[in-house]
Image: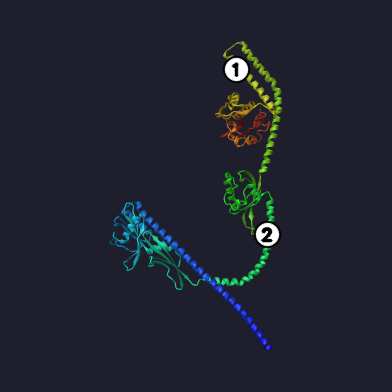
Amino acid sequence: MRGAITGLRSLRSLHTLWQRWFLWVILAVLVVALLATVVWLAGRHEVEQVQTALDRDTADAVSDLRSGLQRNAQSLRATQAGGLDPEHWSVEASALLRQHREWLRLEWRDARLRTRAAVDTPYRRRVFEDESRGPDQPDIVQACAGARKASGPVYSSSHYVPAASGSGLEVMELCLPVEGGGFFVATYSLRDTLIELVAPTLTRGQEVAFTEVDGTRLVAVGAARRVGTRVFTSQQMVELPGTALILRVDGWRAAPDLFPNLLTGLVTAISIALVSVLVLLARDTRRRLKAEHDLADALAFRKAMEDSVITGLRARDLQGRITYVNPAFCEMVGFSAEELTNHVGDVPYWPTELAQEYRQRQAQRMAGGVPPREGFESIFMHKDGRRFPVLIFEAPLINAQGAQTGWMSAFIDLSEQRRIEELSRASQERLQASARLATVGEMASLLSHELTQPLAAIASYASGSLNLLRHAGHSTGDHGEVAMAVRRIAEQADRAGQVIRSVHDFVRRRERTREAVAPQALLDAVLPLVRLQARKLGVRIDVHVEERLPRVQCDRTLVEQVLLNLARNAMQAMDLPELSDRVLQLRVLIARTVGESGGNAGKADMRRWIEFSVADRGGGISAEVAARLFTPFFTTRPDGMGLGLSLCRTVVEQHGGALAYEPNRPRGTVFRFTLPTA
């Protein structure tokens, strides 16, 4: 009984062992089958690749053959450009034969196919005799008949030409009609055609051949088949006008190839290492998840920090391509990050008029130029077309390996700062204007008090003198001139009183009556006094007023004083001994640009301003004088008070215009001021 039990256990153990061996055998068979399948598929894949490559080479060879034949026909047609003279044509045909080894003979035949000129190739012994090339050759007759009908090149079918040495050549004829009648006939050697037009494009270990449509091989060129190689064949039809050939390409490939064996070893090694890799991948995955979690926290922190800053940030690579922009920069220029990143060339926030300057600056950065540490100012353009100033700081972008990968730039929008500076400047100018008015007010009060009575006395004496002359009853010319002079004295005394009262009312901020005055009338009022001083100083006056100018809205007396003061200053600037050509230029025209005070009118009001200019040819204004030119009580003349230009500027600005100056060419100074039209 115990023996039976022991035998039963042994039997069960044997059965279990057999089952394990059976499973291992099945596993081994499956692995071998898998490897065999992989090897077979790899070999199949390689065969398909070789055949595909051979088909592609054959198609390229056919394309090259057609292109070469077409170029040859064009070259042959070009020989008639120099004139259809047999001697000249023979020279050109000889040159063509030296360039094209695939041609055996070139012939020029008349309309009846009689030979007018013929040239043989210099690269082989003469194949054809002139007597055998008569007008009744069937291949040439058939090809030329087709060429006459098609009005283009036609090829004959291939035919065999025996040679003197016992061998022969496969040839075909090309017939090309000639303008004015006749034909050009070119004889091709099929073997040389393969060598010259097809073989250079093939790879090593290939044979190319021409065959008939039925498979008959005509000629073949290439490497011979080696023992132990496999043949791959590809063939394509070459359809030519008048005939058709088959281009066949045979390729030799050694078998078995290294690729399937190598793939088998790789599959085996990968199968053995797969389990180990899975274990390592499990450990690496846990480490990667932890690293990705830490990196996500760091990226979120950096993103929150970049989104909170108001400074624009931009990164570029070494090719100038934008790789990163923060939200502040996008809001600054009005473009989204998708519109800016990976942008090459001119970026959309560059103003068109400054694009060339920015390209040069970017080229300097890409060439390694170091930007200033204190930054530099530039102009950017918002998406809506608005320009705004920015302050730019740039620094090299260094990666973890210490290599420069691009440039990082920070941008600060200076629009608000410029607005505050403009407000400060305007406030400073208003303070200066108030100071000038206060100074002029004190002087005006003193002058008004001191000069009113003398001027009134002068006017009274002048009126009395006129009455005395009138009662005397004399009408001679001398008394008439004296009466005119006395009348002028009375007018100028009254004018001086008006000027004093106008200045007095002006500095006291009283409302003055402004009227519409023609620009010519303003000049006519001051020209008599200007000409009087001009005669004393030897100055020639040049006046130019544009036609049909509108009237200006102004205080006539004050504007006349501005013109008179500028004209006197200009003539005094030319009172130099070395200056002989003294010309005072007075110009009145429609303003092309608006001054600072009138700049708020905008472009729409550009033609609503009249510009007055007073130009001299004196010594000009130096930089030291220009810095204090409109300062009250500053003067360069010993007898001056320094209030003229300060008062003129205040008067013009109170009218809404602007007073400015610039150098006159070739020498001198031009003062310009603008007044609004009525």
Tell me, what colour scheme is on the image? rainbow
Vertical arrangement, residue 388 with respect to residue 239, above or below: above
Identify which amino acid the numbered label 1 is placed on.
Answer: Met
Q: Position of residue 660 (x, y in %)?
A: 62, 34
Q: Residues within 10 Å of mark 1 (few under 14, many from 20)?
A: few
SS of the residue under disc 2: helix
30 sits left or right of 243 in the view: right
What residue sits 62% from the left and 79% below the top? 19
Q: Place residue 386 in its image quadrant.
A: top right
What residue sits 50% from the left and 68% below the top? 46
Vertical arrangement, residue 372 with respect to residue 17, above or below: above
Q: Earlier in the sequence, mark 1 or mark 2?
A: 2
Point out which mark residue 247 bears. Answer: none
Name the residue tied to disc 1.
484
Identify which amino acid the numbered label 2 is placed on.
Answer: Leu
Vertical arrangement, residue 445 with respect to residue 665, above or below: above
Q: Is residue 473 visible?
A: yes
Residue nearer the viewer, 644 or 583: 644
Quadrant of the rendering where the C terminus is positioned: top right
Q: Position of residue 108 (x, y in %)?
A: 32, 56
Name the residue tied to disc 2.
295
Q: Is residue 392 visible?
A: no
Residue nearer the viewer, 105 or 471: 105
Q: Position of residue 555 (x, y in %)?
A: 64, 27
- Which residue in the rendered view is the most extreme toward the front? 1
Q: Place residue 237 in its image quadrant.
A: bottom left
